[in-house]
Amino acid sequence: MLGVRVAGAALSGALVAVAFPPYDVWPLAPVGVALLALLCRGVRARHAAVLGLVHGLATFLPLVSWMTVIGPDAWVLLSLLEASFLALMGAVLPAALRVPGWPVWVACLWVAQEAARSRLPFGGFPWGRLAFAETAAPFTAYAGWGGAPLVTFVTALAGTLLGAAVLHVRTARRSAALLMVAALSVPAAGLAVPTGAGEGRRVTVALVQGGVPGQGMDFLGEREQVLRNHVEATSRLAEDVRAGRVDAPDLVIWPENASDIDPFTDPAARRLVDGAVRDIGVPVLVGAVLDGPGPDYVSNTGIVWDPSTGPGDRYVKRHPVPFGEYIPFRDQLSGLVERLDQIPRDFFAGDEPGNLSVGPTEVGDVICFEIAYDGLVRDVVADGADVIVVQTNNATYNGTGQPQQQLAMSRLRAVEHGRTVLVAATSGISAVVAPDGSVVARTPERAARTLVVDVTLHEGTTVADRLADGPEWLLAAAGLVVAGLGARRRGPVGEPS
């Protein structure tokens, strides 16, 4: 019997995986949640932990298969790490299922496990949150009220209500029908939740996707080529503006690592950047890797470069990628994993939010996978950003589905904060996301493209901004407390009330 449940747990995890980009079959996420809850009903905690682990592996192995570009070992280890949080959730599901109203408490436990793995270890890895599977669904509208945690909660609640309806089909058809209606009402109510942010100042923005010379781990190709690609693309934009083929932008955004050489230590690189900025004649937000501080670090940085005054304010990435941009326990691991030698210097972590004045805008800059972290994005909005910018370099993962997954996160952030989100990528996907989460414009992958788009700048705050992480802590605590109470109850799992 346990073998059948294990197979069912693998199916439930696969259903959740297919809900995410690039597949985007979003209704399958609640179905996967429902199936896992039913499988954990009436089993011992240790068996439910196994079911949770299997569910997690079946979700994360396909979801982060783009990690195979780094190495199969990295892919499997990351999947195991993230699945372990699902195993912990699985271990407490039987207790929560004993308590009347269990569909609510199980949904709260989904929020709790996501809260934990979004913070642990090394600052966490929020990839694979249910909220990020639902950015093409009515559930996303809830983001403006409670952020990603509330979207996860309502997605899981629709699933647990569906599971409760299945339990009642034979014994209480009327209750089953009511529960089914409740399950369908959760996303339906999302259609009535207003999104967007009304009118605001309009500016014209250019997103330069210059392209990269290589693929996979070799995307950098020749030294200086990525920088030259973005310089040439900006010069072509300037020619188009002078010829009247496109509108003159008020600001230009280059992606992360657009300058693959430090323009402050390499005079030739500085001349290239400065020449491109003067040619276009408006401020450019330049993504560059800078040497320092000190000989042991480099910095992943966004630099405001003015055509008259040159480089000005900077944002240093606050959350470098562990084992990708810095090596935890470097002294202990460097002799064991040769691949770590490819990162000879750690990326320095900044300590200030990415609020930068770029021309007529107050940009809230986050770099690459920082868009997945609630607090990092919330900080720039709280400090006055009227547009969110994501400078990213996904060239390593072109064609793997990873850029689509990251774009989905940007769509949720737009709704959560009532802001336009501008995604500038070296080789795709660059995009403009409206405050209602719709994608106004986007580029293909593996191509050199420049988007010139009129966007709206917004001030003010959403309910989610004002509540901050309150909904997450409240929902997570409710789930854990009730699970603790359920563990004290005797007997089989109770029927939902």
Image: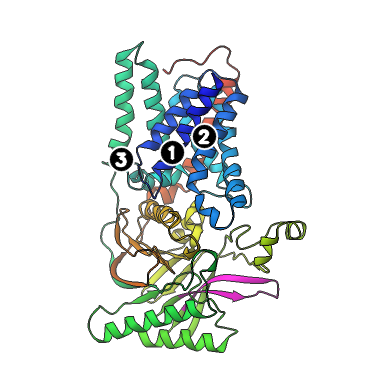
**In the image, is 69 to the left or to the right of 419?**
right
**Magenta part of the chain:** 286-304
**In the image, is 292 to the left or to the right of 426?**
right
Q: Is residue 189 above or below residue 275?
A: above
Q: Is residue 341 above or below residue 49?
A: below
Pinpoint residue 188: horizontal percent, then vertical percent: 28, 36
Q: Residues at badges 3 and 1 in contact (C-beta under 8 Å)? A: no
**Residue occupying image coordinates x 39% and y 52%:** 408
Q: Which residue is mark 1?
A: 16
What amino acid type should be assigned to the residue bearing mark 1?
A: Val
Q: Residues within 10 Å of mark 2 (few under 14, many from 20)?
A: many
> Which secondary structure type mostly characterizes the magenta part of the structure?
strand
Q: Magenta stretch containing residue 237, yes or no?
A: no
What amino acid type should be assigned to the residue bearing mark 2?
A: His
Q: Nearer the viewer, residue 172 or 485?
A: 172
Q: Residues at badges 2 and 1 in contact (C-beta under 8 Å)? A: yes
Please state which of the two labelled residues, at mark 3 or mark 2, is closer to the viewer.
2
**Residue occupying image coordinates x 53% and y 89%:** 268
What amino acid type should be assigned to the residue bearing mark 3?
A: Gly
Q: How many marks?
A: 3
- Quadrant (top left, top right, bottom left, bottom right) of the C terminus: top left
Q: Quadrant of residue 485 in the image?
A: top right
Q: Circle 1 — which element?
A: helix
Q: Residues within 10 Å of mark 3 (few under 14, many from 20)?
A: some
Q: Which residue is mark 3?
A: 190
- Quadrant (top left, top right, bottom left, bottom right) of the N terminus: top right
Give the mark nearest the N terminus, 2 or 1: 1
Identify the mark at residue 55; answer none if there is no mark.
2
